[in-house]
Image: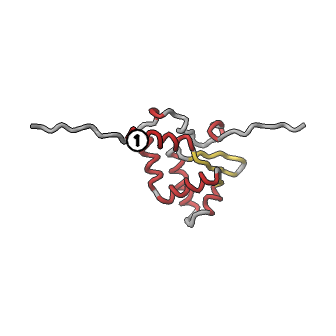
C-alpha cells in the first residue's frame, strides 16, 4: 500500500523550523524595530545576494549556499544567522542537513508596509 502525503509549505510546519516566521503577521503587526532589523539585514550586498540565490532555488542546503559564494563557511553561517534572526529566512532540518528558504510572506509584508511606514513626515510648524 502506497501512502500519499500532501506537500506543505515550510511556514505550515513550525515544529521543523529553527526560527518562527514573522511573515504570518498582519501588516500592522510588524514593529518598526522588526522592520528595521529586516531592512538592515538586506542592506548588506552579500546577504542580499544570498536571499536572491535562495529565493531563486526555492530551498538550499547550507552547503549549497556556501558553494555559491567565495567566502568562508563561518562567514556564510554568520550571514545566514543574521538573515534568520531578522525573520527573512526559515530553516528546516532533515537528519543532519539544514535546508534554508526565504520567508516570502514576510518579504511581501515588508514590501506592502514600506509605503505606509515611509509616508509623509509630520509637518513642522514654523514659529513666528
Which of these two is toward me, 24 or 126? 126
List the single residue furthest toward the right.
1
* Residue 52 place in picture, x, y as percent: 56, 55
Residue 24 left/right relative to 16: left
The crowd level at tag 1 (other Cα within 10 Å; few <14, some 14-19, many 20+) is: few
* Residue 113 place in picture, x, y as percent: 44, 39
Quadrant showing the N terminus? top right
Quadrant showing the C terminus? top left
Instruction: Determine the image quadrant of residue 14.
Output: top right
Q: Secondary structure at mark 1?
A: helix
Q: Residue at x 53, y 41 (%)?
A: 106
Q: Residue at x 57, y 42 (%)?
A: 19
Q: Residue at x 78, y 37 (%)?
A: 5
Q: Reply above or below: 80 against 110.
A: below
Which of these two is toward me, 78 or 108? 108
Q: Reply above or below: 41 against 114.
A: below
Residue 127 left/right relative to 63: left
List the single residue furthest toward the bottom.
70
Q: Residue at x 55, y 53 (%)?
A: 51
How many labels were placed on the picture? Answer: 1
Give the colour scheme of this rendering: secondary structure
* Residue 72 place in picture, x, y as percent: 56, 64
List the single residue furthest toward the left.
128
Which of these two is toward me, 112 or 79? 112
**Residue at the disc numbered 1:** 115
Q: Reply above or below: 77 against 7.
A: below
* Residue 12 place in picture, x, y as percent: 64, 36
Residue 108 left/right relative to 3: left
Amino acid at each position: 500500500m502506497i501512502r500519499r502525503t500532501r506537500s506543505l509549505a515550510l511556514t505550515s510546519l513550525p515544529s521543523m523550523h529553527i526560527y518562527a516566521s514573522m511573515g504570518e503577521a498582519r501588516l500592522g503587526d510588524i514593529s518598526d524595530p522588526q522592520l528595521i532589523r529586516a531592512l538592515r539585514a538586506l542592506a548588506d550586498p552579500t546577504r542580499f545576494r544570498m536571499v536572491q540565490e535562495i529565493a531563486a532555488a526555492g530551498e538550499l542546503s547550507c552547503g549549497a549556499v556556501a558553494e555559491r559564494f567565495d567566502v568562508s563557511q563561518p562567514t556564510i553561517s554568520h550571514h545566514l544567522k543574521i538573515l534568520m534572526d531578522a525573520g527573512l529566512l526559515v530553516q528546516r532540518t532533515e537528519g543532519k542537513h539544514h535546508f534554508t528558504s526565504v520567508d516570502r510572506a514576510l518579504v511581501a509584508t515588508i514590501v506592502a508596509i514600506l509605503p505606509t511606514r515611509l509616508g509623509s513626515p509630520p509637518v513642522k510648524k514654523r514659529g513666528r
